[in-house]
Each structure stands twice: as structure tokens, then as C-alpha cells.
Image (cartoon, grey):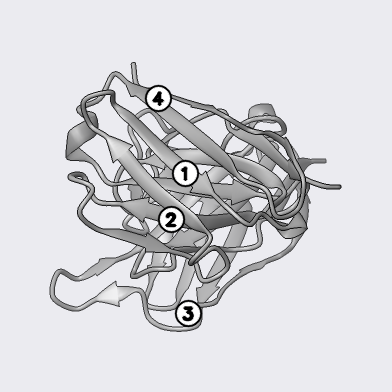
């Protein structure tokens, strides 16, 4: 059974940083593109970023470019999202999702709240 | 960026009746070299992550009941639930994956009448 488990969310002040993790099991993690998708409470889904299987290529939504960094460790079967200079409008549930460009697998999400 | 719209915003359907959700993209999602439409559909229930139902516009994900059917091509797509069951009450999203940024539609809420 494929499992994606996010962690690292929490309350942070504007301008602060957080690092999210997504631990994967039950799949050949190193073979798949992986993504971060966020959802504002009560609102829709927004794709944030994705990373190539070997980590050599990454892409970001314009709203997070220059502030967020996606990475992965294929030995630990874990993906990360380093979020810097956080803003109130980054408040959302962050999901990791794989594989490829449509998302067969999703984690349960981790809540990030940016507030003073 | 490709813009995705859905209609209606919500609908109430009786058990056993048909539900139809429409999705439009601002440009064609049909990739000519492989004749595939880069469009997926998801179902999301409260407190849960989205669940993939359909990809390539009409291919059902493994384990998805055959009452869920995706159709359409180019810029217009439809998700049809042929005989609504109680467990189908949810929000349904379309998503394009033609290129980045991948964009989701705003969602359609299906309620059981």
C-alpha cells in the first residue's frame, strides 16, 4: 500500500520559515515525479511545485518562486519543501502528491498557518 | 497560464439519478503527438485529501466504480456520475497537466437531494 505522510506544519509568523517533509512508502519513490499542492481552508486546490525523480529539475508556481525550495532524498524516500519569507496568504493545508503530472497518491496534508 | 472553469458551482441530485459536471480550459489540452487529453478529475470529501478518479480525460483510475465516466476533448470535458450513490456527495475538481503550472478547476459540490 502506498503511503505519503507529511509533517512539519505549524504556526509561524510572517517572514518566518518552515520545512515540510513527505515520507513515502509502498512505491519506488526514486522513479516518480513528486509534487506539493496546497489548499486554503474552504477553498480550492493550488499546485505549488514539483521535482523530477532524480531531483535534477524543479518547477514552482509563480506565487512561491524565490521563496520556496523543493528537494528530495531518494535514500530516505522523503521529499521536502523549504518555505522562507512566509506570508499570510501561504496559510493552507499542504499536501504531497505523486506520481507524475496527475496525482494518483496523496498524503493527508499538514496545516501551515502564517499569522502574527 | 491555462485557466480552468467548472460548471455548475454546485448541484443537488437524487439518489440513482445522473450528475453531470462540466470543465472548460482556456486552451486545448489535446497533445497532437499522442492524441491524449491532459485532464484529470478528482473527488474530495470533507477532511480528506483529493482522490484521483479519471486521468487522460476518460481513463478510470483502478478501483473507481464504473458509474464515474469522463469524456470530452480539446477544451471541453465532462464528468458524469451515472447513478448517484450516497457516498458520492463530495466536491469534484478537474485539473490540467498539459504544462506547468498545473491548474485545478474551482470545484463543483455535489449534494444528495
Read off the chain for label 2: A
Q: Is residue B62 left or right of residue A91?
A: left
The front one of A105 and B62 is A105
Q: Nearer the N terminus, badge 1 or badge 2?
A: 2
Same chain for the residues at labels 1 and 2, yes or no? yes
The front one of A46 and B75 is A46
Residues under labels 4 and 1: Cα distance?
Answer: 12 Å
Residue at point 41%, 61% (across, down): B71
Q: Say which residue label 3 marks.
A: B1
User: Foreground mark, 4 or 1?
Assistant: 1
Residue B67 percent coordinates (x, y): 48, 39
Q: Does the image show residue B65?
A: no
Q: Say which residue label 1 marks.
A: A81
Q: Say which residue label 2 marks.
A: A49
**Label placed on residue A23:** 4
Residues under labels 3 and 2: Cα distance?
Answer: 15 Å
Read off the chain for label 1: A
Residue B59 percent coordinates (x, y): 32, 49
Residues under labels 4 and 2: Cα distance?
Answer: 17 Å
Q: Is residue B15 left or right of residue B43?
A: right
The front one of B57 and A79 is A79
Q: Are marks 1 and 3 in contact (CB under 8 Å)?
A: no
Q: Nearer the N terminus, badge 4 or badge 1?
A: 4
Q: Is residue B96 left or right of residue A46?
A: left
Disc 3, SS: loop
Residues under labels 1 and 3: Cα distance?
Answer: 23 Å
Q: Does the image show residue A110?
A: yes
Relative to A15, does residue A65 appear above or below in the rendering? below
Same chain for the residues at labels 4 and 1, yes or no? yes
Residues under labels 4 and 3: Cα distance?
Answer: 31 Å
Amino acid at each position: 500500500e502506498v503511503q505519503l505522510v507529511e509533517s512539519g506544519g505549524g504556526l509561524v509568523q510572517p517572514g518566518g520559515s518552515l520545512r515540510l517533509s513527505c515520507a513515502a512508502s509502498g512505491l519506488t519513490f526514486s522513479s516518480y515525479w513528486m509534487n506539493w499542492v496546497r489548499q486554503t481552508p474552504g477553498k480550492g486546490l493550488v499546485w505549488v511545485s514539483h521535482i523530477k525523480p532524480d531531483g535534477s529539475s524543479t518547477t514552482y508556481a509563480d506565487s512561491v518562486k524565490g521563496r520556496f525550495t523543493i528537494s528530495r532524498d531518494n535514500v530516505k524516500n522523503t521529499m521536502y519543501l523549504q518555505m522562507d519569507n512566509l506570508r499570510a496568504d501561504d496559510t493552507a493545508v499542504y499536501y504531497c502528491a505523486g506520481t507524475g503530472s496527475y496525482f494518483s497518491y496523496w498524503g493527508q496534508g499538514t496545516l501551515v498557518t502564517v499569522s502574527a | 497560464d491555462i485557466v480552468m472553469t467548472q460548471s455548475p458551482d454546485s448541484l443537488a441530485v437524487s439518489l440513482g439519478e445522473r450528475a453531470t459536471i462540466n470543465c472548460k480550459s482556456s486552451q486545448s489540452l489535446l497533445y497532437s503527438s499522442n492524441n491524449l487529453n491532459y485532464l484529470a478529475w478528482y473527488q474530495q470529501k470533507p477532511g480528506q485529501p483529493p482522490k484521483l478518479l479519471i486521468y487522460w480525460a476518460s481513463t478510470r483510475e483502478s478501483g473507481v466504480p464504473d458509474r464515474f465516466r469522463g469524456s470530452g476533448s480539446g477544451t471541453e470535458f465532462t464528468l458524469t456520475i451515472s447513478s448517484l450513490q450516497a457516498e458520492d456527495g463530495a466536491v469534484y475538481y478537474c485539473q490540467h497537466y498539459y504544462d506547468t503550472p498545473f491548474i485545478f478547476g474551482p470545484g463543483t459540490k455535489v449534494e444528495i437531494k
